[in-house]
Image: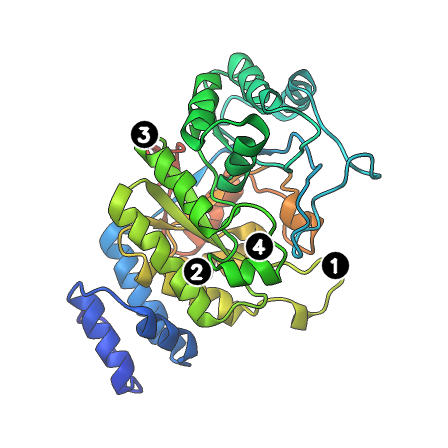
C-alpha cells in the first residue's frame, strides 16, 4: 500500500499494516492493539484504503422512514430510555390503520424502505406483529419492509410457540424482506447480564440471523459500544459476526452504534469521544473484511463526524429516517433525520460520490 506513509509508525502497527496489505485476517490481539494505539491517522488511512478497495469513493444512502408500532416492552435493558410499561404515561401501541394514517402524513414517492422496530410488547399476540407488516405491505407494496430485530424475532418465538424459521416464514408471507440489525448490543453473555439485557442471548441473536440467511433474508447487524464493555469485548463481538458471515454471507452492513446517555443534558464525559467513534468505525472496517459496508450512523455521531468517518472506512450514512425515536429518547443531540439533498451535500462535502440505494444496495442514482 504505497500511499500509506507514517514516519512515527511503530513495529506493531507496521505488522498490522503488512497483514492488511497481504489479505491476512486480523485477530483479537490485533484489534485490541488498534484500540490502544494513539496512531489514529495510520489507523484511519489503513481503513480508508481497505474501504476504497471494496467500494471506491461511493458512499450509499437510502430514502427511508423509521416506524415504531409500540414502545411497550417486557425487557428492562439498562441503556434503554425508549421502552414503557403497559399503561405508563407515554406508552402506545398502534394498529395497522393508525400507522398507515401516520405514514400517509409524512410519505412521499421517493421513500423505498420502512425501518420497523419497537418494544417487546407481550400484551398483544404474535399475529399483531404479522398484521402490522401486512397492513403496510398492502397499502405501500412498492416499499421494502425491513422489520424487527433478532431479539424481537426471538421474543416472537416465545409468545407464539413457533420456531425461529416458522416466525420468519410467517413474517415473509406478510411482506418482510430484511431484518434490522438491532438487539446485538455487545455479543457477550457476561455483558448482557450486567447490563440487564433480558432478551435474546448471544447464541439466539446469531441463530436468528443464521436462520434468516438460510431462508434467503439478507440482514443488517450492529454493535452498541461505549458503556461497560472492554476493547476485547468489542473485538470478540466483531469476530463472532465475521465467523457467521463466513458461514452464510448474509450480512450486508455492520453498524457501530455509539451509546447515548439517558439525558440530553448529560455532559461530554457521559458521551463517547469523537476519537473513540472514529477508531471504532476504522477498526470495524479492518476486522470485518467479509462485510461490504460499514455504516456511519449520523443519528449517533452527528453529521460532521459522519463526514470524517467516510475517510476512516465507512461507506454508508444510513438514510433520511424521518423522526428517529430510540436514540433521541435517550440523549442524542443530532437531527431526527436528513433530507436527500442534505445527505448528498454531506457526502459530496467529504469528497465522496453519493449513491442512492435500495435496501439491498442496488444503485438507484449516482450523484456525480
Q: Nearer the viewer, residue 165 or 90?
A: 165
Q: Nearer the viewer, mark 1 or mark 2?
A: 1
Q: Residue furthest front?
A: 161
Earlier-in-chain disc, 4 versus 3: 3
Residue at disc 3, secondary structure: loop
Can you tell which quarter of the image residue 39 is in? bottom left
> Does residue 142 sit above or below 289 in this rendering?
above
- Residue underneath mark 3: 216
- Residue underneath mark 4: 300
- Residue underneath mark 2: 309
Earlier-in-chain disc, 3 versus 1: 3
Earlier-in-chain disc, 1 versus 2: 1
Q: Residues within 10 Å of mark 1 (few under 14, many from 20)?
A: some
> Does residue 128 sit above or below 28 in this rendering?
above
Residue 155, how many percent across, how many down? 56, 36
- Residue underneath mark 1: 263
Check residue 89 in the rendering and tell me which mark sits there, or answer none: none
Amino acid at each position: 500500500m504505497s500511499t500509506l506513509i507514517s514516519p512515527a509508525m511503530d513495529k506493531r502497527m507496521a505488522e498490522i499494516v503488512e497483514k492488511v496489505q497481504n489479505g491476512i485476517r486480523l485477530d483479537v490481539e490485533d484489534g485490541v492493539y488498534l484500540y490502544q494505539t494513539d496512531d489514529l491517522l495510520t489507523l484511519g488511512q489503513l481503513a480508508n484504503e481497505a474501504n476504497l478497495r471494496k467500494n471506491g469513493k461511493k458512499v450509499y444512502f437510502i430514502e427511508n422512514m423509521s416506524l415504531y408500532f409500540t414502545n411497550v416492552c417486557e425487557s428492562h435493558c439498562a441503556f434503554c430510555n425508549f421502552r414503557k410499561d403497559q399503561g405508563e404515561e407515554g406508552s402506545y401501541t398502534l394498529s395497522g390503520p393508525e400507522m398507515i394514517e401516520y405514514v400517509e402524513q409524512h410519505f412521499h414517492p421517493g421513500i423505498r424502505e420502512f425501518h420497523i422496530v419497537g418494544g417487546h410488547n407481550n400484551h398483544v399476540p404474535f399475529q399483531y406483529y404479522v398484521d402490522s407488516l401486512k397492513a403496510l405491505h398492502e397499502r405501500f407494496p412498492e416499499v421494502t419492509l425491513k422489520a424487527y430485530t433478532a431479539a424481537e424475532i426471538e421474543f416472537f418465538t416465545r409468545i407464539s410457540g413457533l420456531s425461529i424459521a416458522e416466525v420468519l416464514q410467517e413474517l415473509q408471507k406478510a411482506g418482510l424482506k430484511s431484518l434490522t440489525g438491532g438487539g446485538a448490543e455487545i455479543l457477550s453473555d457476561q455483558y448482557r447480564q450486567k447490563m440487564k439485557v433480558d432478551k435474546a442471548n448471544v447464541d439466539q441473536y446469531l441463530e436468528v440471523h443464521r436462520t434468516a440467511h438460510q431462508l434467503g433474508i439478507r440482514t443488517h447487524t450492529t454493535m452498541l459500544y461505549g458503556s461497560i464493555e472492554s476493547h476485547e469485548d468489542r473485538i470478540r463481538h466483531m469476530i463472532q459476526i465475521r465467523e457467521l458471515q463466513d458461514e452464510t454471507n448474509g450480512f450486508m452492513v455492520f453498524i457501530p452504534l455509539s451509546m447515548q446517555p439517558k439525558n440530553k443534558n448529560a455532559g461530554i464525559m457521559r458521551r463517547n469521544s469523537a476519537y473513540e467513534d472514529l477508531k471504532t468505525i476504522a477498526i470495524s472496517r479492518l476486522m470485518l473484511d467479509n462485510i461490504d459496508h460499514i455504516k456511519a450512523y449520523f443519528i449517533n455521531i452527528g453529521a460532521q463526524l459522519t463526514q470524517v468517518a467516510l475517510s476512516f472506512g465507512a461507506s454508508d450514512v444510513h438514510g433520511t429516517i424521518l423522526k428517529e425515536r430510540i436514540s433521541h429518547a435517550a440523549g442524542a443531540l443530532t437531527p431526527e433525520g436528513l433530507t436527500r439533498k442534505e445527505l448528498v451535500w454531506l457526502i459530496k462535502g467529504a469528497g465522496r460520490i453519493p449513491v442512492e440505494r435500495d435496501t439491498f444496495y442496488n444503485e438507484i442514482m449516482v450523484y456525480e
